[in-house]
Amino acid sequence: MKKIYYHKLIRDRIPIKIKKSGSQARYRILSKKQFEKELYKKVGEEASGLLSAKTKGELISELADIIEVIEAIKKFKKVSDKELVVAKKGNMKKKGGFKKRLYLVWAEDTGYRTNERKYKK
């Protein structure tokens, strides 16, 4: 049977689903450093799923996936809910929220750099 190479972090029950389907697969246990790196990559993977959500149900499922990965990162990095609430409040005070639906078209270069990736249109 043809093999598909995924090279990505998967949920714990995926091997069971693969086996039940009659397929075979190869897995490995990641080191803590590898696991952390793959968790961060997984957030991007799951977030990209939002773009393909067409129904409210699909959107809810994609949001749940993102939250699950974030919860795993919180647990792995020992980040408490309280720490996140404090950071969220600080970010809200410093940067605000999204109520105004503002879209930045351009700004003069002052040297400020965000942590976002550049996306092609």
Image: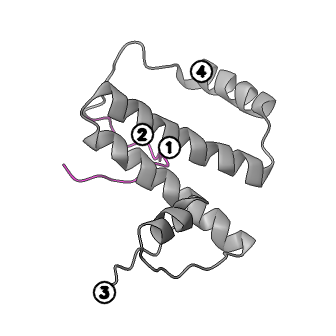
Instruction: Residue 62: give its label.
Output: 2
Q: Of 31 and 22, which appears nearest the observer?
A: 22
Of tags 4 and 3, which is closer to the observer? 3
Q: CA distance from mark 1 to mark 2?
A: 5 Å
Residue at horizontal 54 percent and vertical 68 percent from the top: 15
Q: Disc 1, disc 2: CB below 8 Å?
A: yes
Is residue 9 visible to the viewer in this orientation of the structure? Answer: no
Of tags 3 and 1, which is closer to the observer? 3
The residue where tag 3 is placed is 1
Circle nearer the N terminus (3, 1): 3
> Whole-percent x and y of residue 44?
45, 53
Q: Secondary structure at mark 1?
A: helix
Q: Amino acid at mark 4?
A: Met
Callout 3 crowding tier (Cα within 10 Å): few <14, some 14–19, many ≥20: few
Q: Is residue 29 left or right of residue 27?
A: right
Residue interval drawn in magenta: 106-121
The residue where tag 1 is placed is 65
Q: Amino acid at mark 1?
A: Asp
